Amino acid sequence: MSESEFIPFHRASIGQEEIDEVVATLRSGWLTTGPRTKRFEEEFAAYCGAPHALAVNSCTAGLHLALAALGVGPGDEVITSPMTFCSTVHVITHTGAKPVLADVGEDGNLDPESVAERITPRTRVILPVHLAGLPCRMEEIWALAERHGLRVVEDAAHAAGARIGSRRIGGDARSAAVAFSFYATKNMTTAEGGMVTTFDEGLEARMRVLCLHGISRDAWNRYTDKGSWYYEVLEPGFKYNLSDLQSAVGIHQLRKLEKFLAVRREYVAYYHERLGRLEEVEPPPGDLEGWHAWHLYILRLRLEKLTIGRGEFIEELRRRGVGASVHFIPVPMHPAFRSLAEEERNACPRAAALYERIVTLPLYPGLTRTQLERVAQAVEDVAREWRR
Ligand SMILES: *Cc1c(COP(=O)(O)O)cnc(C)c1O
């Protein structure tokens, strides 16, 4: 690889193990949900310390499934973060419930005090998002949920491998369900895919039925006289199952996750040390202990010390061969959510202010040490050139 080659924002780490497992799956004749998906679910549940894990074809599907299975619908409200991907809010809308936005705290995650202000008699669920893999202040969110009789569904798209205290995210019974993403850019991938963990046996059973067209798996057991061709559709369901082809990739990605996380932490240590010396930028919150999944390195600009804004900063990085991005454009800023933005109670001024100064730098195990140093050098050069 040439020294001057463009450093992409992300590149997945796929090894020979994943390739061999995919080929073996193709040769096995069983392509869709089957033995490999079952193994992937069991290994993911064990990794998180959850009794149940359900493989789905995206985190979006997992969040939708959890809300639908909880019976969230018209007349209900679900409180979530403005600093998230649009699908966190779409799934609430698709159930017929109303999304309500609470503002973020200094850490960029849902602020429990802002959540408390948004709770009404219609609130059913709190849906926190662990931005960048940094766990939300869950103790406070669980306490609020308990006090008001609400359920918690976590968007853990960034948080595979993160921990709260001694428990992994996805491994605490106080949340009804936790949804993970295995999209191509996430900490581990199946190209497209996701997983939902839960401690609630009834919820798991209902999610499994809804996940595959509302078909009951048990029906044929009750009608053995009809044989194995028989099934019953219990309600209009979704098509959200994960295929064995994808699980073949996921099984090996999961086994490598701890190794991936260790490299991420090592790279974060480098960024923290080197960029932490600059006056013009501020490293993201979070240390190098194992509780942060470090999915994203969201640098914060000190705009008062720079003569350029965030957009130009990213453009300057690109000119120096570095791909950067923004996580996220706050929900109320998208045309699709204009009506949300117009409601006074959804006002999120801290999210709006944070948005103006965030730049996500490349951070992934496939990055070489040389590339990592080039990214840091580019940030230093841009900061120096446009210093106020
Ligand atoms: C990626 C992402 C999702 C969606 O994940 P998919 O697997 O692509 O559906 C949801 N929430 C957040 C915060 C994400 O970053």
Image: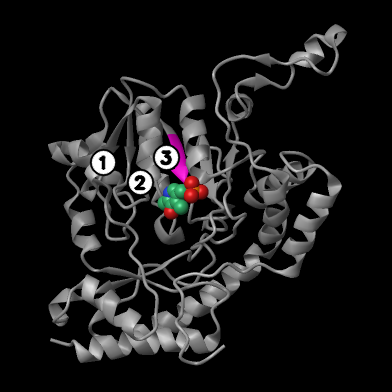
Kind of residue at disc 3: Trp
Quadrant housing the N terminus: bottom right
**Residue tagged 2:** 86
**Residue tagged 3:** 142
Q: Are marks 2 and 1 in contact (CB under 8 Å)?
A: yes
Residue sitting at 39 percent across and 51 percent down?
137
Q: Which label's residue is closer to the chain start, 2 or 1?
A: 2
Kind of residue at disc 2: Cys
Quadrant housing the C terminus: bottom left
Q: Is residue 248 left or right of residue 133?
A: right
Residue sitting at 32 percent across and 46 percent down?
81
- Mark 3, Cα crowd under 10 Å, few <14 / some 14-19 / many 20+, is some
- Mark 1, Cα crowd under 10 Å, few <14 / some 14-19 / many 20+, is few
Residue 189 appears at what percent x and percent y? 59, 57
Q: Is residue 14 left or right of residue 238?
A: right
- Mark 2, Cα crowd under 10 Å, few <14 / some 14-19 / many 20+, is some
**Residue tagged 1:** 336
